[in-house]
Amino acid sequence: MGVDWQSPTEVQKDFQVFLAFGYCHMGMWFWEYLMTINIEYELLKGTRPFRLPMIPYLLARYFVCGSYIFGNILYHSERAVNCNAHLIMLQLCSGYATCAASALLMMRTSAIWHQDTYINIFLIVLNLGQIVTWSHSTMCAQTIWVDGEGCIVTKVERWFSANYVLTMMVDGIVLTLSAGRLLWTRRGMGIGGLNSLLITDGMIYFIVTFLINLLQAVFALLELNTPMMFIMAWGAATISAMAACRALRHLADFFRKEESAKGSARGYVFSQNWSNRKGAHGRGPSAGGLRSDVGVPMEDLEQAEYARQIDSASAQTMVVFPELQYGLAEQREQCNTTRSMV
């Protein structure tokens, strides 16, 4: 005999399962939030520059927090509340967190395409369509207050699942644009690590969010009962936001490590060059270590001269091999547009 999903006993049991999933996702989210709150601290302190991608990053984080606040009021209030208002706010927070997560992925794609006007317009239209769809979804469910039981969902429209199907389609289109561009412009050998990071993080984000949104869409389409239709709604918003925010932090960490490595390598080259010059001439800097006329350390002058010679040699190389100039320009533009995100 099959399970009677509409029986009061089964509905109550599924509601407890729904709450248990919600507690797990809430605990996972707040742990993630506390472990990464240093981003907000650095922004407030001014040690981290506030750039445009920080807007969807912060929106995703705090919309998820808002969804848990309104959700707990909706499902645990012991006194009469406006159930429909709290449900609308819960749906808006969850939906806008998902839209903000998608916007973060879109900004990475825009950077990869060097802020191409047509790509930007296309991505903006996609994100606006996603926001409109999630905003319209607030009318897909209705709730009432029942004394002794709390807020009870009385109606859920079938097209509620369209939100998750649309999110999967949007993320798939954006990932295809990103990966296609990165694989097509492979001449930038110097940024292979960056290409690999962008593709890997993009794939991880897409796979994780695709699976969680697919699971929620399937449960919504099955219409087993009301709790089962929303079983993964919290999880979809939470995991999408976590994956997108982690992708942005990985990009920031990549550039910080790159800058640190370049600084160390530059110091090593200058140090080796000075040691070689010292050995060749059999002497070091003058007794005072300064030029008497300008008061500048001799070692700094030697290093500056060495750097100038390197730049001159690079310029001559570009004249002999002009085809390299386009490749290096492409690398610099790729790095600069992507670096502007973090």
Image: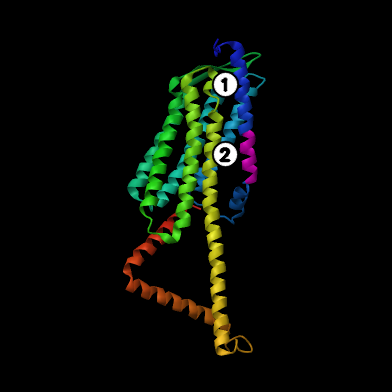
The structure residue drawn at horizontal position 55% and vertical position 49%, both measured from the top left corner, is 249
Q: Position of residue 116 (x, y in %)?
A: 35, 51
**On the image, numbered disc 1 is attached to which residue?**
83
Quadrant containing the N terminus is: top right
Q: Nearer the viewer, residue 67 or 329?
A: 329
| Residue type of the residue flagged with mark 1 | Cys
Q: Which mark, by number, is residue 103?
A: none
Q: Secondary structure at mark 2?
A: helix
The 10 Å Cα crowd at callout 2, few under 14, some 14 to 19, many 20 or more, is some
Q: Is residue 320 above or below residue 201?
A: below
Viewer can see residue 322: yes
The quadrant where residue 25 appears? top right
Q: Nearer the viewer, residue 187 or 105?
A: 187
Q: Which residues are magenta?
A: 26-35
Residue 213 lies in the magenta-colored region: no
Residue 28 lies in the magenta-colored region: yes
The structure residue drawn at horizontal position 65% and vertical position 43%, both measured from the top left corner, is 34
Viewer can see residue 89: no
The structure residue drawn at horizontal position 44% and vertical position 47%, both measured from the top left corner, is 107
Q: Report the coloring of the rendering.
A: rainbow
**On the image, numbered disc 2 is attached to which residue?**
62
Q: Position of residue 160 (x, y in %)?
A: 46, 24
156 vs 145, left or right, is left
The 10 Å Cα crowd at callout 1, few under 14, some 14 to 19, many 20 or more, is many
The structure residue drawn at horizontal position 48% and vertical position 56%, both measured from the top left corner, is 193
261 vs 321, left or right, is right
Q: Position of residue 200 (x, y in %)?
A: 48, 47
The quadrant where residue 226 appears? top right
Q: Is residue 288 above or below residue 334?
A: below
